[in-house]
Image (tube, grey):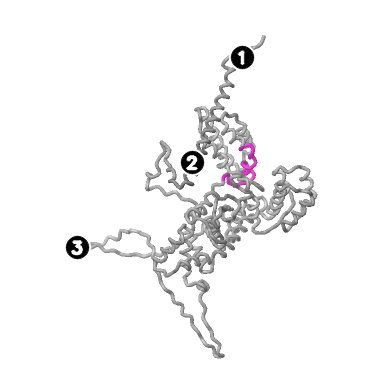
Amino acid sequence: MPIEIPENQRTVPWVQSLVGLVQNQAELIVHLQVTTQELRDEIARLKNTPKRPKFRPPGSKSTSGKNRNEAPNRDSSNDERSAPIQKAKEEIVVKPLNIPNGSRFKGYSAYSIQELTLTPKDVIYKLEVWQAPDGSIIRAHLPPEIEGSHFGSDLRALIHGLYASGMTQPALFQFIRNVGIEISEGQLHNVLMGEARGYEKQSEAILSAGLEEAPYIRVDDTGAKHCYQNGYCTHIGGQYFAYYKTTASKSRLNFLQLLAKGKEGYVINDAFIWHLFEGGVEDDILNAFEAYNGKRYSAKKGLVRLLNMMGIKGKKLRLTCLEAGLVGFVQETLKPGQVLISDRAGQFAILDHADCWVHMERPLRKLVASTTEIELEIRQVREAIWTLYEQVKAASISQEGKEAIEKAYDALVERQVISLGVRGVLKAFKENREGLLKALDHPGLPLHNNDSERDIRGMVKFRNVSGGTKSEEGRAFRDGLVTLKQTCYRLGENFWSYLRSWFRRNPIDLAACIRQRYQAAANPP
């Protein structure tokens, strides 16, 4: 006799499928609404009509009514971690009026202020000229920081400091003229651009020190215009350094060339084979390259000849092989065991890579629940992710409970959910398990890429205020200036003090400081 299934049990799968269908349609509607609004904004931009105002969401708190006693928000471009500057002190005694006879002095009531004096002055260097007994002429020479310029070292440091803080050249010109300095727009431009090559050289030394010493590096990029063409600025940084480079491309090949620090080389090694394997190259080609393991080429044409000899003709496959050759070369030049942290953009997902938990979880914030059940599901998954995040963070320091964390991670990614969006996030967590749990094998490794995003805001501010650069010199100057400023912040050095020492021709060796900091952290007393 067949067993009858109760009616309510037969309808449960059907109801669940309907709930899932409704949620998928709700997510699709939200996606289409966003796309429609983006298209409307683009049409409005092309028609040169006013931008749509940004309204505060209903029920959210206004940011204009903040408590004035609260500290303002700070980003990584500020100098709160910099070494303090020695201030001059001055005491002014103020006596009250109409003191009656017989009054007794009871001390002082102190009131402290901070002041700054900007006093323009002309300095005349009178270079002595002597004639030796043999008739030869002996002339005095200008101090090293003055030679080649008619503007003092502190004035030039002030100009560069204000420009690094976001002041444009026209605004800077007006300010310097109003202070009382006689300078033309062309001279101001020369004062800025005169340090372009020096900044560029120092920034390349910073990159070399960071890549050679840092246990991990963080990367990110943003848009940047050059010569009226859209380009990209790539940020490479770590705990004690930051480096910026603007190029026309954001490809993986471009990123590998930055890591190669201007050198060229192609190496067939294990990293080469692994990169081809990750790129989906067929096994017979991988086996063919195994016969050339250890082969090195100093130029691109050497590897191209090998590809021609092996009969590899596909354009995409040849490009992947060239990338693999650079990966092999870069892997040998980097510090052994160094980890790369990024938002897993395609150009950065190479070498020993760790993924950012914040970027992986971010899609959950944008999901719109169609039912209270879906809303509860999204909230529970987010809470589970961040609970696991804290456990991984603690385990990366103590190296305890790794197996339990891995089991909890596997249970999370295998959770059964209704929402298609939540399912996609859990699938991404499952596919990137190794990168997200990388910290379990590397003590102290950050689980996010927030520091790199904060560092690159300095370049975004430059782009928004000044637009793009128009010459190679200007590009080198901007990239180098931001590199020096942010590296000073990372090291805790005062950027103003650094600029003054730079123009006095006795700058701090930032590359040496970076090496010292990393070596001290790796070998604590």
Type of residue at label 2? Arg
Residue 277: x %, y % from top left: 72, 44
Q: Which residue is denoted by mark 1 in the rendering?
A: 5
Residue 525 in view (yes/no): no
Q: CA distance from mark 1 to mark 2?
A: 53 Å
Residue 276: x %, y % from top left: 72, 46
**Between tags 2 and 3, which lies in front?**
2
Of the residues under marks 1 and 2, which one precedes in the sequence?
1
Between 224 and 338, the one nearer to me in the picture: 224
Label 1 crowd (10 A; few <14 / some 14-19 / many >=20) = few
Q: CA distance from mark 2 to mark 3?
A: 77 Å
Query: Tags 2 and 3 in contact by the CB under 8 Å rule?
Result: no
Mark 1, secondary structure of its residue:
loop
Q: Which residue is denoted by mark 2 in the rendering?
A: 40
Read off the magenta span: 428-448
Q: Which residue is denoted by mark 3 in the rendering?
A: 100
Type of residue at label 3? Pro
Mark 2, secondary structure of its residue:
helix
